[in-house]
């Protein structure tokens, strides 16, 4: 039995659009149409909210253990189908198979973690203010959740939101990216096979994201919106959610600095920068967007880093040994090209790369630029591609000021062997996530999220489940 049908998943059923309309899902490596998927109208998405609303009381009333058993079964099924999911991710999104395989493991880890975390939701018994009163604070699921997700992690961005929602007793309507709906649908099918009841998890597919977004944010039955994507769309959803005062979590854009101090372990810093910059062809919100290197180590770093970059294999993610797959689409490629052109026109030097790769129209050659400065577009905008711009600095204060000179505040990284500097810089960076002597920070056990215009709320870790809970205060009068 196939892992998905190319339609929406509503109330445990596969549902096409009434109009019969579809949209194409394209393999970015080849340009081939992989699938034609049902293009639901916004009005049809209301059915998914109806289903989630109806399922909510029955799901919420289960014990945390009963929900954990279903989630654990879902986790096992994701692992059993890891190879199919891996290929699906690479086909619709483009990342190399090794990375897609990693995403399946990473994505599944949220299901497992929150299955356990759901059993550790506690409340409080508070010392009363009067002798004839007793005071409780209990935690309850917020209700129906709308989860709007991006294309760069088609599986993990769904499980990171849906697992804590389900574990806490909420029900969900997912709106996956129109670029990558297939993995989302496959994950829903596996949830259904795991015994998660009809209506608890729904997935609406459609091209008109703004219209679907308006339905999800205007319906008063939806009590929480959780979104990962651009800052621009996040702000729209924040505004729209204000009307019915929904809870909201936003995981938005970043402009991650990656700072290498003179006393850094050079090999570790180069390894960290390669992983942090080029994972997913540079298409993650925590990818290093600005590499700041202290003058004493600058030339050595550029040499060692570039020596690694030029060995990276650019090819279809399905090709053995591929390190860099295609960019997601022509818009993504155009942005990378414009940023590089702008930097070169303002005095940057391309040490390697700086052009489209012969593997195909959406493949971009891994690029190292030196002499980058704050006048260039890539200093303030997220490039979202395999381009490493290197800035030179002299003093710690200068690096911190440069790093913080952005409206974003998601992830930042730095490399140093000095303990005092470690604490000074860790505390001074205005970011929600700090990688110290490492380029990889994502894990299900830690709170992931940004400050400033990078978002609100945290995903993962013990903090992740709080986002889906309300605190209900109970004041009990007793006879003394
Ligand atoms: P990206 O540039 O990474 O694709 P977007 O913020 O455009 O990021 O998209 C992230 C998700 O938000 C996708 O599922 C997309 O369909 C959805 N989306 C885009 N625009 C809107 C909108 N106005 N309202 C609701 N969802 C939207």
Image: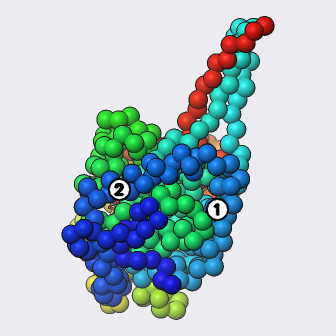
Q: Depth check: give the residue in front, 443 or 240.
A: 240
Q: Quadrant of the C terminus?
A: top right
* Residue 329 lies in quadrant: bottom left
Identify the residue shown where x is 70% and y is 38%: 122
Q: Is residue 107 above or below residue 227?
A: below
Residue ID for mark 1: 70
Residue 154, percent across and down? 45, 69
Q: Is residue 378 above or below residue 281?
A: above
Q: Depth check: give the residue in front, 376 or 470.
A: 470
The alpha-carbon separation of the residues under discs 1 and 2 comes to: 24 Å
Disc 2 crowd rating (10 Å Cα; few below 14, some 14-19, many 20+) is: some
Mark 1 or mark 2: whose residue is earlier in sequence? 2
Residue ID for mark 2: 47
Q: Depth check: give the residue in front, 120 or 237.
A: 120
Identify the residue shown where x is 28% and y is 49%: 214
Closer to the eye: label 1 or 2:
2
Q: Is residue 85 visible?
A: yes
Q: Is residue 431 visible?
A: no
Residue 6, percent across and down? 37, 76
| Disc 1 C-beta below 8 A from ligand 1 | no
Q: Residue furthest right?
A: 480
Residue 306, percent across and down? 48, 77
């Amino acid at each position: 039995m196939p892992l998905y049908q190319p339609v929406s998943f509503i109330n445990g059923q596969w549902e096409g659009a009434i109009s019969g309309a579809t949209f194409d899902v394209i393999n970015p490596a080849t340009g081939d149409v992989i699938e034609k998927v049902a293009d639901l109208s916004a009005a049809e998405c209301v059915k998914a909210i109806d289903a989630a609303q109806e399922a909510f009381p029955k799901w919420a009333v289960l014990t945390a253990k009963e929900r954990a058993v279903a989630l654990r079964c879902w986790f096992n099924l994701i692992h059993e189908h890891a190879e199919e999911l891996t290929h699906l991710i690479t086909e619709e999104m483009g990342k190399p198979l090794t990375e897609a395989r990693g995403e399946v493991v990473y994505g599944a880890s949220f299901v497992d973690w929150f299955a356990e975390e759901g059993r550790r939701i506690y409340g409080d018994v508070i010392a009363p203010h009067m002798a004839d009163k007793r005071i409780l604070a209990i935690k309850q699921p917020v209700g129906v959740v709308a989860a709007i997700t991006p294309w760069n992690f088609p599986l993990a961005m769904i499980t990171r939101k849906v697992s804590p929602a389900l574990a806490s007793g909420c029900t969900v309507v997912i709106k996956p990216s129109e670029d990558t709906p297939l993995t989302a649908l496959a994950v829903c099918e596996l949830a259904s096979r795991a015994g998660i009841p009809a209506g608890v998890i729904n997935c609406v597919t459609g091209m008109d994201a703004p219209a679907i977004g308006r339905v999800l944010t205007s319906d008063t039955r939806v009590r929480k919106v959780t979104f990962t994507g651009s800052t621009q769309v996040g702000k729209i959803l924040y505004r729209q959610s204000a009307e019915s005062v929904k809870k909201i979590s936003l995981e938005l854009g970043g402009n991650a600095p990656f700072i290498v101090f003179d006393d850094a372990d050079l090999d570790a810093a180069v390894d960290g920068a390669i992983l942090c910059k080029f994972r997913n062809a540079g298409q993650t919100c925590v990818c290093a967007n600005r590499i700041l290197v202290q003058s004493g180590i600058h030339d050595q770093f550029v040499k060692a880093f570039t020596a690694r970059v030029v060995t990276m294999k650019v090819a279809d993610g399905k090709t053995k040994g591929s390190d860099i797959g295609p960019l997601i689409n022509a818009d993504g490629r155009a942005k990378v090209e414009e940023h590089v052109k702008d930097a070169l026109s303002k005095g940057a030097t391309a040490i390697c790369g700086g052009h489209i790769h012969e593997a195909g129209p959406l493949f971009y050659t891994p690029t190292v630029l030196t002499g980058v400065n704050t006048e260039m577009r890539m200093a303030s905008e997220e490039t979202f591609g395999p381009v490493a711009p290197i800035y030179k600095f002299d003093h710690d204060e200068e690096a911190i000021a440069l790093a913080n000179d952005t409206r974003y505040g998601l992830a930042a990284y730095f490399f140093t062997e000095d303990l005092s500097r470690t604490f000074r810089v860790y505390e001074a960076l205005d970011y929600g996530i700090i990688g110290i002597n490492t380029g990889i920070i994502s894990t299900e056990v830690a709170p992931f999220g940004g400050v400033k215009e990078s978002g609100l709320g945290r995903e993962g870790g013990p903090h992740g489940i709080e986002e889906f809970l309300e605190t209900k205060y109970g004041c009990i009068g007793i006879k003394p």
